[in-house]
Amino acid sequence: MSEGRLQRTFSQFGEVSQVKMIIDTKSRQPLGFAYIWFTTEDSAELAVKEMNGKFFDGRFVYVTIAKPAPSKSRKGPYKF
């Protein structure tokens, strides 16, 4: 699997602006997931609808809309 192959495959649902495969820093091997950015929300939702739960390139894929990470800002001092 490559970022280019993911981009070509997911482009059938709309314009893909970026693809990022997550790589292990020590082994330099893919961890088995990637982020795909679409230019429109409708394209992303269509990709989820059409690809989630399907087999792609011999693998079962789970496709969802990413949620932002919770804010790590802290208010006030730590309490123990």
Image: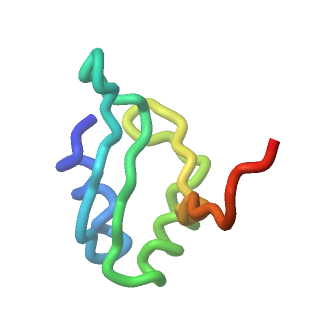
Q: Is residue 3 left or right of residue 62?
A: left
Residue 42: image x %, image y %? Answer: 47, 83
- Residue at 32% x, 68% y is 12
- Residue at 39% x, 54% y is 35
Q: Is residue 68 left or right of residue 15?
A: right
Q: Is residue 34 left or right of residue 20?
A: right
- As drawn, 66 above or below 2: below
Near-viewer residue (25 or 79)? 79
- Residue at 57% x, 67% y is 49
Q: Is residue 69 left or right of residue 7?
A: right
Screen quadrant of the C terminus: top right
- Residue at 34% x, 67% y is 37
Near-viewer residue (67 or 72)? 72
Screen quadrant of the N terminus: top left
- As drawn, 75 above or below 25: below
Residue 5: image x %, image y %? Answer: 23, 47
